[in-house]
């Protein structure tokens, strides 16, 4: 794997000077390589990992698993493309195992997510069934510990 990509995936806020020092190359070389990665679509974007539980944002995250039946001219790629365009959908994965497509969805409430499933996903002709699980707490996201640094003040007793 490219060491530049590894460094950026760990901390996208590193400056070109810091990256150049870590890679024993010039800032110009780093800038050119990053620009090439962005232009070719290898680097899709940069995003902060936020512990939303420490904010006043009202939201819920859900993992939705879909079983789908591809139709003529409507295979997995096309179905995933349609679903990915919904604003509520944060990620879409083609899966092996018990489901065909898995989604991560965000809404303001449990009801919002339920209505999204009922009114936007379930009516899609290719969708055979859905299974929704709500995220109750995030401990680690994209390799970053989010909630494990918090102290759990519940008493632990042994039986």
Image: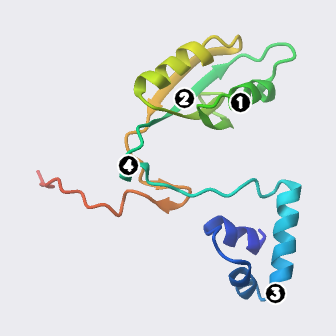
Query: On screen, 129 above or below 44?
Result: above
Give the residue at mark 4: 53
**Image quadrant in which the N terminus is located:** bottom right
Give the residue at mark 2: 64
Give the residue at mark 3: 25
Crowd class of label 3 (few under 14; some 14 to 19; many from 20; radius 10 Å)? few
Give the residue at mark 1: 85
Q: Residue at x 24, y 57 (%)?
A: 152
Number of numbered markers: 4
Label pair 3/1, CB-CB below 8 angstroms? no
Q: Position of residue 8 (x, y in %)?
A: 68, 68
- In whole angstroms, how far apart are the C-alphas of marks 3 and 4? 40 Å
The quarter of the picture where residue 58 lies is top left
The quarter of the picture where residue 64 lies is top right
Q: Can you tell which of label 3 and label 1 is closer to the viewer? A: 1
Q: Could you tell which of marks 4 and 1 lies nearer the N-terminus?
A: 4
Label pair 4/1, CB-CB below 8 angstroms? no
- In whole angstroms, how far apart are the C-alphas of marks 3 and 2? 44 Å
Q: Residue at x 37, y 53 (%)?
A: 54
Name of the residue lying farthest toward the front: 56
Relative to residue 7, is residue 32 drawn left or right? right
């Amino acid at each position: 794997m490219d060491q530049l990509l590894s460094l950026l995936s760990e901390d996208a806020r590193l400056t070109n000077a810091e990256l150049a020092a870590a890679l024993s190359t010039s800032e110009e070389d780093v800038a050119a390589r990053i620009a090439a990665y962005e232009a070719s679509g290898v680097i899709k974007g940069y995003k902060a990992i936020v512990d939303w539980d420490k904010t006043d944002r009202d939201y819920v995250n859900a993992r939705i698993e879909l079983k789908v039946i591809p139709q003529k001219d409507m295979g997995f790629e096309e179905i995933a493309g349609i679903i990915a365009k919904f604003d509520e959908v944060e990620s879409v994965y083609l899966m092996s195992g018990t489901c065909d497509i898995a989604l991560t969805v965000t809404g303001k409430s449990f009801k919002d997510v339920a209505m999204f499933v009922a009114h936007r996903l379930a009516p899609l002709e290719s969708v055979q069934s859905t299974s929704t699980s709500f995220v109750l707490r995030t401990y680690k996201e994209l390799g970053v510990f989010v909630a494990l640094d918090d102290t759990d003040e519940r008493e632990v007793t042994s039986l």
